[in-house]
Amino acid sequence: MNRVQVSLQERSYDVLIGSNILPELNCLVQDVLSASQFFFVLDTNVEATHGEIAMDSFACKTDHYALEAVESNKIADTIDSIWSSMLNQGCDRGTVVISIGGGLTGDVGGFAAATYLRGVPLIQVPTTLLAMVDASVGGKTGINLPTKRPDGTTILGKNLAGSFWQPRLVVADVSALQTLDDRQLRCGLAECVKHAMLGHPEVISFIQENHDGIFNRDEEVLIELVTQSVAIKAEVVAKDEREAGSRALLNLGHTFAHAIEPMKELGLFHGEAVSIGLCAACSCSEALGMIDADFVDQIRVLLVSIGLPTRLPMPIQLEDAMGLMQKDKKVIDSCNRLVLPSKDGAMIVDDVDKNAILLAWASVGVTSS
Ligand SMILES: NC(=O)c1ccc[n+]([C@@H]2O[C@H](COP(=O)([O-])OP(=O)(O)OC[C@H]3O[C@@H](n4cnc5c(N)ncnc54)[C@H](O)[C@@H]3O)[C@@H](O)[C@H]2O)c1
């Protein structure tokens, strides 16, 4: 079992990465904290499998809330239901919330833990590759909020309410990925590519050299992939826990991605939107002369070899994309602030030239009428 520490003084915690470790979840948790009551927030797709294995390891009182992992459930009403369920089960400030599922369940369970009785301890048990390499680490929790599109219709803006609430422990059992389908596995690889683009080309080589091992769910390969990616994220988070500065680098590609992910007509999962967002960020950077065309091609070829999209599945209007991009929380305090790939990694660029943004959108299939 590998162990990566997220160093945050008194809020430091370990990310444990191994295979077949869920049956020992109770012991792993008890090593970190003791509690008389545990409340599980469970992704319905893993409830009867990985969720049951994990819950069975606990001899004491456990209750749970089952959540269907769709973005339309990542809303305030769901948090309200979890709070009520916790109250009805008599959860107090000593109750530990354990989120078991993908990034969506982690974000929702995490936000409920952050706010119930002003905050109770949280354990993250990610069961998708995306949640293992990214979402479960770093303490961001949150939900979507309804917002308007230019045509007056309502759409769910990504992660517009939330909090920083660090888990006390993250347990990533790569054996859970045996039941994850290839499309979701590819979504996780999009976040690995993002981490690699922050100045870690060795992760790109690892993905290229171990393509078959990853898709065959070779658990040794998956442990190494998750460990490399978590180590990158942990280092960034340790330097800037609350995104006052350099942590924003982790948003590479996400300002573009968050504009297109909520558009239901595109049918994109988060990791797929990130993949297209990374391509748009590359084009923007190339237009600004920060990277050359060869680098952009290298990233596109890598994403295509993984089976990730590099363009929108259907055209969307520029006005729509720009409108939602402006609502992304990362661009509010500074006009056109973007994280863009550079020669040595990525950098935060303020007041990005609007023409470069338009070119970036056009490069992934956004049209202007
Ligand atoms: N907090 C953060 O730092 C952070 C970072 C990245 C993404 N996110 C958020 O994470 C979400 C995306 O996470 P995701 O890609 O894990 O998606 P997800 O949580 O929606 O899970 C994807 C699908 O896989 C299913 N699933 C989960 N584990 C499974 C398993 N082991 N076997 C079979 N099916 C399984 C789920 O039920 C769901 O249908 C988005 O809401 C995104 O905003 C948060």
Image: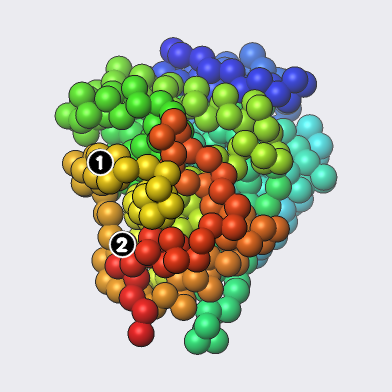
* Mark 2 closeness class: few <14, some 14–19, many ≥20 residues within 10 Å: many
Q: Nearer the viewer, residue 362 or 327?
A: 362
Q: Is residue 155 above or below residue 32?
A: below
Q: Is residue 280 visible?
A: yes
Secondary-structure class at tag 1: helix
The Cα atoms of the two marked residues, 2 and 1, are separated by 15 Å
Q: Is residue 94 above or below residue 186?
A: above
Give the image quarter of residue 59: top right
Residue at the (33%, 34%) spot, across then down: 177
Q: Which residue does the numbered mark 1 point to in the structure image?
A: 294
Q: Nearer the viewer, residue 163 or 65?
A: 163
Question: Would residue 242 be found to the left or right of residue 274 on screen?
Answer: right
Residue at the (51%, 61%) spot, across then down: 353
Q: Which residue does the numbered mark 2 point to in the structure image?
A: 363
Q: Is residue 29 above or below residue 338?
A: above
Residue at the (58%, 29%) spot, across then down: 236
Task: State the image coordinates of residue 203 (x, y, percent, origin top left).
Answer: 35, 26
Tell me the amino acid under the disc marked 2: Ser
Q: Residue furthest front?
A: 289
Residue at the (46%, 76%) spot, across then down: 320
Give the image quarter of residue 228: top left
Foreground: disc 2 or disc 1: 1
- Marks 2 and 1, the one that precedes in the sequence: 1
* Mark 1 closeness class: few <14, some 14–19, many ≥20 residues within 10 Å: few
